[in-house]
Image (cartoon, helix red, strand yellow):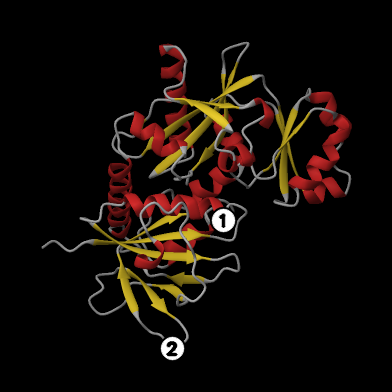
Amino acid sequence: MTEKTRVAVLYGGRSGEHEVSLRSAASVVRHLDRTRFEVIPVSIDKAGRWQRHDLRRIGQTGDEVLAIPPESPEVRLAQGDGEGSGGRAAVVGLDGARERTEIDVVFPVLHGPLCEDGTLQGLLELTGTAYVGSGVMASAVGMDKDVTKRLAGLAGIPIAPYRAFTRRAYERGAVSLDEIAATLTLPVFVKPCNMGSSVGIHKVKAWADLPAALADAFRYDTKVLVEQGIDAREIEVAVLDGDPPFVSVASELNPQAHHDFYSYAAKYLDPEGATVDLPANIGPEQMERVRELALRAFEALECSGLARVDFFLDRQGGDFYLNEINTLPGFTSISMYPKMMEASGVSYPELLTRLVDLALERHRTRRGLTREFEG
């Protein structure tokens, strides 16, 4: 019998998107192919504590969230130096519980800062661990909306006008709100640069409301951006790595009027917060254009594994503008990345299998690189 691949599903995290992660992880655990994979749930709680859990207790079919039982043993991630490990990383118990479980790959199902911004990926690189998704650089760049837009602009991908600045610059008066009002027109969107799931985002319709919106956005990040609002439709595309990469059909999100825009509440709390057109109700040329732009963004940021690329489609001019790229998009039962893939012919279980295989292939390739100069 072929030995199963041990997949550590890592979930939770210390970001404002902790609860979203619990939902994403429940879907991933439920759909991973048990004939190929042995699932090892590992959580990071809001205090940063790592724990390993008994799948029989937290992975019941139909659960909407993957729980974090506080009594589960605390663990750490260790390098693959154990006897017979074959270089695989391991989950090791703490507090005298030295149980060691070798793992083949980590499937991070975490969102937001300290999760998908390159910090976790750096730890996984240091421990020599195979993992699903983009590496340190693409993760960090993709998390920062400002840097994403800068690189996208260099690659010729259209972006909406915006201003980005740090809290320090704002507090010392180096940022002129009058100048922002002179260069952008209402409405504008205020966004933390390093946050996802629409956390901390405000639609500002009156300049008098801008300071309050900035104050709230600065609660979540030390850098924010003020972006020109566009009378636009919200179009998303899913990209799956490969040779060549696979690009899904686009979808369109239609927030209900009482949400004003596709907010956190519309995404995760209100089951009727938005309707979805999948595929998006756009012409063949527009579909081809947005899929081509999504692939260009994926490659320009040097992503790997997967990404969801979000665009605005100007209702007046018909132009696409890059909104953001998500290197670890949501995987809940209503998340758009797996839905777009399924609509394009890749089922949820097959998608997860391909992501794990891609992670292992990338890890083998990187391990084969020479680390020392041999002359």
Indicate the secondary structure of the residue bearing disc 2: loop
Q: Say whether residue 290 is left or right of residue 245.
A: right
Above or below residue 40? Residue 208 is above
Question: x, y (%) of residue 26?
Answer: 42, 54
Above or below residue 221? Residue 252 is above
Which circle marks residue 96 in the picture? Answer: 2
Residue on which the image places disc 1: 18
- The amino acid type of the residue labelled 2 equals Gly
Q: Residue furthest bottom?
A: 96
Is 165 in front, or is 255? 255
Which residue is rendered at x = 56% and y = 56% of the image? 18
Which residue is rendered at x = 75% and y = 52% of the image? 219
Q: CA distance from mark 1 to mark 2?
A: 29 Å
Indicate the secondary structure of the residue bearing disc 1: helix
Residue 132 seen in the current view: no
Q: Do callouts 1 and 2 mark residues in contact (Cβ within 8 Å)? A: no
Q: Say whether residue 6 is left or right of residue 254.
A: left
Question: x, y (%) of residue 194?
Answer: 63, 47
Which residue is rendered at x = 37% and y = 59% of the image? 60
